[in-house]
Amino acid sequence: MTSDSLGSLLEIARSIAVDAAALAARRRREGVQVAASKTTAEDIVTFADREVEAFIRSSLLAVRPDDGFLGEESTDSASTGSSGLTWVVDPIDGTVNYLYGIPAWNVSIAVVEGDADPLTWRALAGCVVNPLVGEVFTASDAGGAFLGDAQLHVNPPTDLSQALVATGFSYSSETRAKQGLVLAELLPQVRDIRRMGSAALDLCSVAAGRYDGYFERGLKPWDHAAGALVAREAGAHVAGFGGAPASADFTLAAEPALAARLEPLIAALFAEAGL
């Protein structure tokens, strides 16, 4: 795929994500209504999630009618398309933050080559927009990562003891208890731990040097499709265990030397906690 083609896909992702984020922010100001719970009572979907995803899907259909689509709120109607490209969308990543008025949520749009499977896809372009702080993260394959017009680079190598590491937690209380055991062992070995509540923003924060590393288990494709590309294009090692692609099994993003220290440590802690 040519750089012009990638540039066109990136501009589509950016333009639609910015408009969708403005819609989500407007609905937040008007008042959030929970539409349903999903995997647990804590795992919610708002009416705005559904409206924003419908807006993104219709906007993409108007300009890329032959592409596939996978969105968080419409997995039952995901489409494969005929072009070989699939748009992977999280209409509001960080829905609990959105519900509570915490300014750490975003609209995340990525386009990938192949099926909507992070184990096999090739991410081509992506955009993550946090409208409440006016930040637009973008990246394209081999084209670099940017916050607005500023190119992003991960932090330089640092000792594990000085690393600021982010993570996320499961909606399952049983799993969270085990994750707490992992953090109890990890926390004394790093500078500190952060938990923002948005995988896409966590990944972009690694790209921007706000974190040294980030890890999580249980991410869905839409959680990391765009953010992982931003982190990778900023120079992060982004992968699962053993060099596997980042997926629901495990996602780690960090400066490469730090990632080499974190991966075996986290794997051992997961095993001890029964994760």
Image (spheres, rainbow, N blue to C red):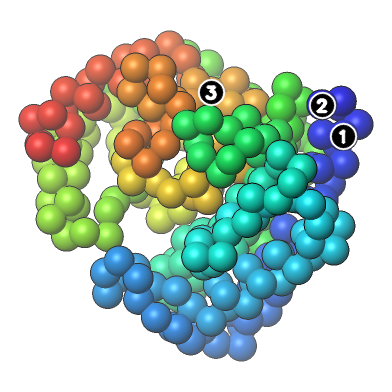
Quarter containing the C terminus: top left
Q: Is residue 73 left or right of residue 247?
A: right
Disc sitting over residue 25 in the figure: none
Identity of the residue furthest to the right in this view: 4
Mark 1 lies on a secondary structure that is: helix
- Horizontal and vertical percent for residue 67? 74, 50
Mark 3 lies on a secondary structure that is: loop
The residue drawn where x is 87% and y is 34% is: 5
Disc 2/disc 3 C-alpha distance (Å): 23 Å
- Tell which of 228 and 205 is nearer to you: 228
- Horizontal and vertical percent for residue 88? 61, 50
Residue 7 against residue 158 in the figure, above or below: below
The residue drawn where x is 31% and y is 30% is: 191
- Tell which of 84 and 1 is nearer to you: 84
What kind of residue is marked 2? Met
Disc 2 or disc 3, which is closer to the eye?
2
Classify mark 3: residues with Cα within 10 Å, few (<14), some (14-19) or many (20+).
many
Q: Is residue 198 left or right of residue 49?
A: left
The quarter of the picture where residue 204 lies is: top right
Identity of the residue furthest to the front in this view: 82
Q: Are marks 2 and 1 in contact (CB under 8 Å)?
A: yes
Disc sitting over residue 1 in the figure: 2
What kind of residue is marked 1? Ser
Disc sitting over residue 236 in the figure: 3
Residue 56 against residue 174 in the figure, above or below: below
- Horizontal and vertical percent for residue 200? 53, 47
The residue drawn where x is 79% and y is 52% is: 66
Mark 2 lies on a secondary structure that is: loop
Residue wearing tag 1? 5
- Tell which of 58 and 160 is nearer to you: 58
Q: Is residue 262 left or right of residue 179?
A: right
Disc 2/disc 1 C-alpha distance (Å): 6 Å
